[in-house]
Amino acid sequence: MKRTALVLSFLLLLAACGSRVDTSATGPTATVSPTGNGSSGSGGGTSAPAAADGNKIGTLTNPCSAKKAEGAAPTDTPGVSATTIKIGVISDRKNDITPVPTIGVEEAAQAFVDMCNDSGGINGRKLALTKYDSGILNTDAVTKQACQAGLFALVGDGSVQDQQGVPTREACGLPEIAAYAATSERSISKNFFSPVPGTQPDKFNAGPCKFMADKFRAATKKAAMIYTDVPASKVRGQATIEACEKEGFKYVVQAGVAFGEKNFAPVVTQMKDKGAKLLEVVSVVPDTLKILQEVKRQGLDLDVVDLGQQYYDPAMAQDPNADGAYVLTNTTPFKEKDSTPALQVYDKWMKGGPETSLGVQAFSAGLLFAQAAASLGNDLTRDSLIAALKKIHEWDGGGLQLLADPGSNAHNDCYLYLQIKDKDFVRAFPKKGFSCAKDNVVTLSKKYLTS
């Protein structure tokens, strides 16, 4: 079991950090948060910062409100009563067996529910959140529980093995507004939405490849890709290779390291023999740090280390061997909280909990759900929710994240690079906001799927 769990945690090159401990898998819990005041409205998109108060979440008008809609709601909508909307969140909680990149997902979903209920709920209906621990191995099992629990929707969730449970969720008609999709199978599934669409079978955001090719052209001609040689990470690594080769990369090393391998001397020696100057890794933080330690031990002189969003993790920054590495993020850097009112709202409602980039995406997913649901008034059915979500084509969560088109499930075309300097993440590119361009998204020669 330890072996399988660790394998599956390698999946998230473009996602971020981990979650809470409960390895007992005894079953979900539900909470309904206190009441409060607020007002409804619409908003989103990118503009000047706005006040972080009860009516605004950055540039977004708070979609949560105590003001009740006119008319009567349908009586046969799962999870909806006169006073309550039942939603669920599925995530891999932190455990003592293997590192998981989903820390902060469940906590951020709870933070969103607390914020929304404090503002009066959605058109006066309070949210009741049921939490499920997918435990890396149990995504389908807990999806079956969610289907049987009479929920209106899944909101803010994310599991590393999310290709499991897709047929189950589709069969029971449960809409999903997730923090992210870890696999292409999930991202293209029926009635699935995410505030940051990505991880699609034959599409890839090559904007980071373009940046590296422009800034480190010579190094990109001697690139190395290391991934754990299991389906999930292998697929992501190979998709990255194809996308970056379209931008002129030449890979002198493409190495799949056997699962469980802790001796990285051979692969680093291979890189040294081939004169590698740029390193990409699809793995977990602890193993990537071991690779970088071996790079230093052997005296391999790399020009650049290029890492995905899962490495936006304090443990990465604290290791001196990671100093200088570039790290992607889909969300506004935490270092910019003072100038980002939406992040201030997120921080307030996290109440000291783990703040992670994936957690921000989970909070943004909650807001996306609320925006669509609130627009329906009392026409609150799953079909009408899905239709409303499909109409939202500009979304940045009030300034929490890059600008995206969740309604069309269009692959995101933006990126932001941080760089690790003196044990901290510092904005590297662009100077403000995110770098976005339609031609960043390239079409790959085949569909990259885990199955």
Image (tube, grey):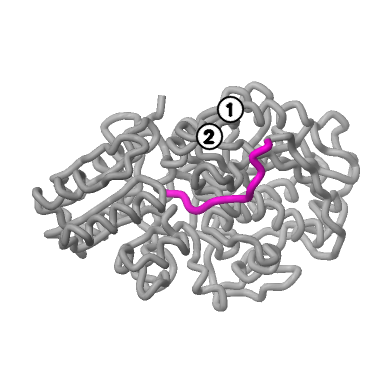
Which three-letter amino acid code belongs to the residue tagged 2?
Asp
The spot of residue 196 in percent (x, y) is 50, 49
Q: Looking at this view, is 356 or 240 the one in front?
A: 356
| 91 relative to 359, above or below | above
Residue 16 is covered by the magenta coloring: yes
Circle number at residue 199: none
Q: Which image quarter: residue 220?
A: bottom left
> From the viewer's perspective, is 35 left or right of 449?
right
Q: Do the residues labelled 1 and 2 touch (CB within 8 Å)?
A: yes
Relative image position of residue 107 (x, y in whole percent): 66, 54
Give the labeled residue for mark 1.
Answer: 165
Identify the magenta region. 14-24
On whether residue 341 falls in the magenta region, the answer is: no
- Name the residue: 55% across, 36% down: 136
Residue visible at 59% across and 50% down?
Answer: 19
**Residue picked out by circle 2:** 162
